Image: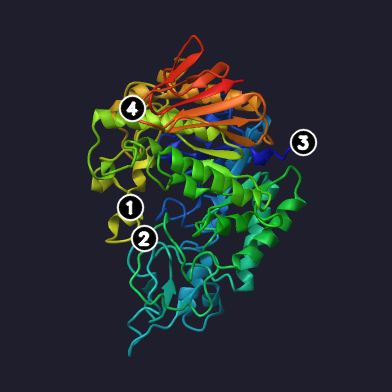
């Protein structure tokens, strides 16, 4: 029997924006518990929760002050325990975020390190250094922060500390044994509570090159393009994950770990999922692949080959809490300048059409699929949020990551005709404003409606369990220019028209589901542009 995670569909929940039960405008764990039946009925296998730990929320919870406590804005540890129990009762597994690269600057270790001053043993658990220059007035090296500016902040006693992200997120020093010991106990705390695994934030960043050498040239880094650098994807991270794998394997039920690992090549990413390390790694290379048949096929082949080489499943995803929703990214085939202007209605229609086709393609590929909350509703990116409501810390810095992550984090609509659309109590607040146009995109508005995006996802997830097996390989078939066709096993075929013209081809069998209108007459199928079809053959 195949391990559950090798072909699982895992649904990412961004807790702030999923469901608000107490009416304060911020989503919470009780709200998630109340919506678990929706996820069961959608047809996913597991949920992944972004951070809900105690945090000052300088970076929406990715600045953790206490890894064993739930932040009061989200609920309590008992709420987390109840959520896991409820999910298990209806057949869902629960994966939680783990943030091991950095803590909050309010973490007790960091606060004590500041209080005790230079020479404190606690400073060795982070990266404190003396500055350069005659008065120590310059940062210890030339590394930039992903969020913009230098990766160093000076404290009152004159020393500097490293933060590859916001200044409120000091990096741990993973060369210190106390850090490794601490995280092994954190893993056990949540495994004992019953979680089924961890998504590891910045999995590629824990180990820095010895001596923290200069890059030697001006650089800025983006999460999507870290490339080769002295602070990412160092070989030493793999010893950490081997020790974590041994802990995970002690627990029943196949507990897993998933790496958010940005690396220069697919083979470098595959290093994280060797048999004695982690179970899965996000395939960000696929997320960034152009909507073009040749590019898609090449990336699919390369992704499968890299992971097959280490015996790991490939993962596929199109959106998450850090990137622009794929309904927006795909508005133009080659993306062009849509991100820099207000999209037209034609753009939006094209974006949704391609997003639906891309999603149906993704769900037909071998391996595990990750969905981001709201994509099953066809939600667009919210691009017109005013500056005063934006909360992405990178938005308020001059350089670095673009700072527009708030647009994919707007709370999702459940019901009703006005905000907050069932996200919270009627007439209640929402931590980010929802567009007036979202009434037609709510779960209520799409539920049971033939052809709606929600209906398409439900149909596809139901069929996915029936029409091919995890072990069924992908076999490419001949297809017209701009069209991809492949089989999974002996009875399933997927056809995708990525061209700008309708594609005419022989219908290979019975149509199972489609992302858009398809005509079949006298054995000939006509697929409009940007359409995916699943066939029973």
Residue picked out by circle 4: 438
Say if residue 75 shows up in the picture: no
Residue that badge 1 annotates: 403
Query: Considering only order in the chain, which callout, 4 or 1, is on the residue closer to the N terminus?
Result: 1
Give whichever of discs 2 and 1 has the lower sequence position: 2
- Res. 153 image quadrant: bottom left
Comes first in the chain, label 3 or label 4: 3
Q: Residue furthest bottom?
A: 134
Q: Is residue 101 above or below residue 216?
A: above
The answer for how far apart the CA atoms under marks 1 and 4 are is 23 Å
Query: Label 3, label 4: how many angstroms apart (C-alpha)?
Result: 42 Å
Residue lying farthest top?
522
- Front: mark 3 or 1: 3
Vertical order, 164 against 335 (above or below): below
The x, y position of residue 81, in whole percent, is 63, 41
Q: Secondary structure at mark 3?
A: loop
CA separation in Å, label 2 and label 4 = 30 Å
Front residue of 219 and 68: 219
Against 60, residue 486 (above or below) is: above
Name the residue beneath numbered marker 3: 1
Q: Secondary structure at mark 2?
A: loop
Residue that numbered label 2 is attached to: 147
Q: CA distance from mark 3 to mark 2?
A: 44 Å
């Amino acid at each position: 029997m195949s391990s559950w995670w090798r072909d699982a569909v895992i649904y990412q929940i961004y807790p702030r924006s999923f469901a608000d039960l107490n009416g304060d405008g911020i989503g919470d764990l009780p709200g998630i518990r109340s919506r678990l039946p929706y996820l069961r009925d959608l047809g996913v296998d597991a949920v992944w929760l972004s951070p809900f730990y105690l945090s000052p929320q300088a970076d929406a919870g990715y600045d953790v002050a206490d890894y064993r406590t739930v932040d009061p804005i989200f609920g309590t540890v008992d709420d987390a325990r109840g959520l896991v129990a409820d999910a298990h009762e209806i057949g869902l597994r629960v994966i939680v975020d783990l943030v091991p690269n950095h803590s909050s600057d309010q973490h007790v270790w960091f606060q004590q390190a500041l209080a005790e001053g230079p020479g404190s043993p606690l400073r060795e658990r982070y990266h404190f250094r003396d500055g350069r220059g005659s008065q120590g007035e310059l940062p210890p090296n030339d590394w930039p922060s992903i969020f913009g500016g230098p990766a160093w902040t000076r404290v009152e006693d004159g020393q500097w500390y490293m933060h590859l992200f916001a200044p409120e997120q000091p990096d741990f020093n993973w060369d210190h044994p106390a850090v490794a010991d601490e995280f092994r106990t954190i893993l056990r705390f949540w495994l004992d509570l019953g979680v089924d695994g961890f998504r590891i934030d910045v999995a590629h960043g824990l180990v820095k090159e010895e001596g923290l050498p200069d890059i030697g040239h001006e650089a800025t880094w983006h999460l999507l393009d870290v490339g080769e650098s002295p602070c990412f994807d160092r070989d030493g991270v793999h010893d950490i994950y081997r020790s974590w794998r041994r802990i995970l394997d002690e627990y029943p039920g196949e507990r897993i770990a998933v790496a958010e690992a940005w690396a220069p090549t697919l083979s470098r990413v595959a290093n994280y999922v060797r048999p004695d390390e982690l179970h899965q790694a996000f395939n960000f290379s696929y997320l960034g692949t152009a909507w073009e048949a040749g590019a898609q096929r090449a990336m699919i082949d390369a992704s499968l080959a890299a992971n097959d080489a280490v015996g790991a499943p490939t993962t596929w995803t199109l959106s998450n809490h850090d990137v622009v929703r794929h309904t927006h990214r795909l508005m133009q085939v080659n993306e062009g300048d849509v991100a820099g202007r207000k999209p037209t209605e034609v753009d939006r229609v094209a974006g949704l059409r391609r997003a639906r086709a891309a999603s149906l393609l993704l769900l037909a590929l071998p391996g595990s699929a990750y969905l981001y909350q709201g994509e099953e509703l066809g939600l667009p990116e919210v691009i017109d949020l005013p500056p005063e409501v934006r909360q992405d810390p990178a938005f308020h810095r001059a350089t670095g990551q673009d700072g527009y992550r708030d647009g994919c984090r707007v709370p999702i609509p459940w019901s009703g005709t006005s905000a907050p659309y069932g996200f919270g109590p009627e007439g209640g607040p929402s931590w980010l404003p929802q567009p007036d146009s979202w009434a037609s995109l709510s779960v209520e508005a799409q539920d049971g409606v033939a052809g709606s995006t929600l209906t398409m996802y439900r149909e596809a997830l139901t069929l996915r369990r029936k029409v091919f097996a995890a072990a069924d390989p992908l076999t490419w078939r001949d297809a017209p220019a701009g069209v991809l066709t492949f089989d999974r096993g002996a009875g399933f075929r997927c056809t995708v028209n990525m061209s700008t013209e309708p594609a005419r081809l022989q219908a290979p069998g019975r149509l199972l589901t489609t992302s858009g209108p398809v005509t079949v007459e006298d054995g000939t199928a006509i697929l409009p542009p940007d359409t995916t079809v699943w066939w029973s053959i």
